[in-house]
Image: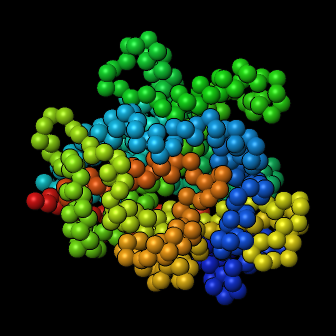
Amino acid sequence: MLWVRYNSRENRAVHNAHLKYGPIVRLGPNEISVNCVDGGIRTVYSGGFEKPDFYPNQFQNFGLPNMFSMKDSKPHSVRKRMISNVYSKSYIQSSQDTRKITQSILFERLLPILHNMSGQRAPVQVYELNYAVTMDFITSYLFGVSNDSNFIQDVLMRKEFLGWFLNRNEHIFWDQELPWLKHFVELLGIHLVPEWINKANSEIEAWTLKLCQSGQRSLSLLAQSTGNAGETHPVVFKQLSDSMASLHAKAAEQVEHRSAGPVNLLIASEMLDHLAAGMDTSGITLTYLFWELSQHRDLQSLLRQELFTLSPPLTFPLATSTPSLPNPRDLDALPFLHAIIIETLRIHCPIPGSQPRVTPSTPTSVAGSPPLPGGVRISAQAYSLHRNPDVFPEPEKWKPERWIDSTKEQRDEMGRWFWAFGSGGRMCIGSNFAMQELKYVTAAVYTNFGTSIVDDTGIEQVDAYTAGPKSQQLTLMFERVK
């Protein structure tokens, strides 16, 4: 299995094994994969199965844990309680900060660029632009809109950051699977991972620290009521900073609450995890959503008809000087828009790879197996769950209508197998933010433009934990619609 992972064939190899052998497959002497809901992901991801070293080895920042990299559920739960409220659907939909962020990014950055490019009949490299959009959204929510990345407009910084970020992915094997071997051979002067990777990680961490410092300055200005009236709060940064301060003040002597490091770096580690995940996953999703719709002009027209039922519609240029957004609840209720996004997340899941856990010390049965001893690596992967032909007929086809034309029972069953955000207590905390962001961006684009493919060479997803296009590019033409 290590050789399969090293050669980036894990997702398809595991999926083919499940097709051949059923819902539970032994991948190695001490590793199992499951591909079912009952007795599978419901058992493994509902508690009691902790994370293995895979996560801290790869996802710590500044050498310190964040919520995603934490192995044990207890510290994870403590951290999650600190910030979960600002990622709840009700909070995001009613947040004036989120509203201002969306207005700023759509009407002051993204739509003007697409309007100009369409007027010039110039093609747009949307893979890179989508990463810019999603990074601007998440950093605005983390640190405030005046402190965000502004990658949509700052093209040079965008390209520099993406150079650091994206080119690391092909070198993650050693840290994830054999970190001890990597460290051992480094003592002999052999570097299995190029040394520039460390420099890229340092640059990303330094950039994140600057954002944290800007967020802290904004908090001070807002506390003094000297902030700009159009400014937004550093929502997540403030929430985590306040919660960490409260925790340390109330529980400084409790061993389980003692810091694993300096508080400012613990916060920075968490912020870096959020901004990286928020950019990467939603950027990939938008890319494949645009690609699929660009092959179906009829579906673009159907979507546009639905989008013009919003009040006000997301038309650009603006009829007035003040941008206005439709109510997020009205947007969320659009069935075809929702179906397009969910189906894209199904067939082009941005994180299709396995999510490993470790069996507990008490022998436990999964997917009809005999009781498994403790310490067995066990995982499921969205790639396979999303391709069950009994649940998703013609699973390799992008068919958004499946989420509308099916019976309620069929939709409910598809929902049980849908795993783009994971499940259980450790599912993606940013899922509500991501869905609202994806819906507003998609609605803004297809209210105003039609898209067609110029160059989709290498659009196939890589076989990896996080899976973007092999070529890291997609070029489209945007045309104004009447």
Provide residue 225's location: percent of width, then percent of height.
Answer: 40, 13
Residue drawn at x 55%, y 58% is 421
User: Left of 1 or right of it: where is 412?
Assistant: left
* Farthest front residue in view: 408
Query: What is the x, y in percent for residue 6?
Result: 67, 68
Count numbered badges in the picture. Answer: 0
Residue lying farthest top? Answer: 224
Residue 13 visible? The answer is no
Looking at the picture, tell me which residue is in the foreground, 200 or 482.
Answer: 482
Residue 432 can be seen in this image: yes
Where is residue 261 shown, x and y percent of the image?
Answer: 73, 30
- Can you give x and y, in whole percent of width and height, for residue 32 in the image? 76, 72
Q: Is residue 234 above or below residue 427?
A: above
Quadrant (top left, top right, bottom left, bottom right) of the C terminus: bottom left
Q: Residue at x 39, y 29 (%)?
A: 232
218 above or below 296? Answer: above
Figure colour scheme: rainbow
Q: Nearer the viewer, residue 275 or 222?
A: 222
Q: Quadrant of residue 413?
A: bottom right
State the quadrant of the N terminus: bottom right
In the displayed structure, 185 sits above or below 60; it is: below
Residue 267 vs 133, above or below: the answer is: above
Q: Residue at x 77, y 31 (%)?
A: 257
**Residue drawn at point x = 70 percent, y = 86 percent:** 21
